[in-house]
Amino acid sequence: MTQIKVVSSLEKIFPQCNGDFYEINILSMLIGERASFQLAINTDEPLRFTVEGADSVCVNSYNIGFVPSKLPYYEDHDDDIITSPDGYYPDVLYPTENGEVEFVNGGWCSVWFELEAKTAGLNNIVITLFNEDNDEVGKAEICVKVINAVLPEQELIHTNWFHCDCLATWYNVDAFSDEHWQIIENFMRVGNAHGLNMILTPLFTPPLDTEVGGERPTMQLVDVTVTGKDEYAFGFDKLDRWIEIATRSGMKWFELSHLFTQWGAKHAPKIVDVNGKKLFGWKTAAGGKKYKVFLTQFATALDEFLAAKGVKDKCWLHVSDEPNDMQVRPYAKASRLISTLFPDYKTLDALSDFKFYKKGLVKTPVPSLDHAHIFYGKVPNFWTYYCCGQYKGTSNRFMAMPSYRTRVLGLQLYKFGCVGFLQWGFNFWYSQYSKRHINPFEITDAGEAFPSGDAFVVYPGEGGQPLVSLRYKVFYDAFQDLSALKLLESKIGYEKTLEIIENKSGEPLSFVNYERGIDVMLAKREAVNKAIEENL
């Protein structure tokens, strides 16, 4: 006998579940917003579905695929996690074909429905299930109210590091070949549709998550020609094409790749000439004369190009990622060189030691969520980030975390007035330190290095098209919540808006303290929508 339930998008449904899900029968949204729900199904036969009544919304549907996890969380995790019965987690979303349901015989499966609101109105959406004999075997309904208010454009600057080499490796195409460019654009567009508006731009191969002495595949947008002893010429044709594609894909900001190696700025990134000969890399001291001469010439040429292209004010520079307190001296030397060569550019770096900012070594520090309180109120433009290290009390997007824990980020970003959010793994499909490539459908933890879900939110689909994870949908919901809160603030002010989302018991909402539960998260968003409607 087929069982069906309309379930919140914040639920994670496993085949072995007992069917005790958080069911919903109504939801509200704003014009221009995307909202999701799931249809949980327990059946022992192939099914297909039809959708009726979606008058003011567009409907996309996905079957939810399961992927394995050997490292779902660290041993000293907190207690706000989900343990999989068999080591597999629901994550990858496959667009449905002709309404067919990918079912689990004798267990629960789910179809993910995403609604995009076009106009205001009330939608009584009816989903009907049929078996192979075309007999109706079940029907479910949900009422969707589209409020007559437009969701504002995202103000938050968001970067999620975009790894071009992983795309080339998976699809077996040459770097910046026509095929590679098309794949890059496909993934940029999907990223932008989920809040990505700042793109990591590989001027030179980004020196990120690379084993010391090792290499990632060369991904260099700038052509370098050696014209004499310590003399160089630069070509920007590929960078020009990158900017055009990124702009066409919706990107507003360009995050120029790090000009020194990760974790301390001790070396130059890998830089090759037009013939593929390595000019700089692990054997190049960051503070050496040769690299300084190169950077001086490069800075002049890059500045002229970006200014002529009209994007100079949209570019941000990096020095090095996450230096620690033992690396202040080399980082300081590199930072001061960049400040001298690029005096009127914005810079940012992920770092959680306040002394780097206090010493004036970085204009825009990006601390981790668990260190954000140290920087809050002390920096003019407040950014934050999370990665694998933020798993005790913080929001994050691991597969083993409940979805409300991912979505609560939007409330936190709003309360603390964040202008930017960074995360490192948009599509990192390598093992830790980039030692080997992996199949993300089979290895989700970078080779048991990071909790599953930390390293990527998209999967490589057929034909160079990305497949999105359900975590990415929920992550984007957090950004939509933030935009809705901004809209409400424009009507009733910050303090009254904050009252609606503030913790109702215990300590106030912070980056390490949030109210748990699907019901709490949904109730807060519904309260925001109600207040918006009341103040139209």
Image (cartoon, helix red, strand yellow):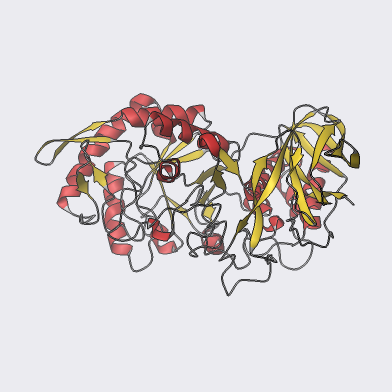
Q: Is residue 137 left or right of residue 461?
A: right
Residue 291 seen in this snapshot: yes
Name of the residue lying farthest toward the bottom: 76
Residue 498 screen position, x and y as percent: 73, 51
User: x%, y% of residue 271?
Assistant: 25, 45
Viewer-proximal residue among 267 and 458: 458
Counting every numbered tag in the picture gives 0
Q: Nearer the viewer, residue 188 or 51?
A: 51
Q: Is residue 171 above or below residue 4?
A: above
Question: Compared to 187, does 418 lie above or below?
Answer: below
317 or 508, which is in the foreground? Answer: 317
Front residue of 127/155: it is 127
Q: Horizontal and vertical percent for residue 108?
A: 78, 55
Residue 499 visible in the shown view: no
Residue visible at 39% across and 56% down in the picture: 434
Q: Is residue 512 left or right of residue 241?
A: right
Is 333 placed above or below 217 here?
below
- Please state the horizontal and vertical placement of residue 154, each as a whole percent of the image: 61, 38
Rendered position, 219 above or below 362:
above
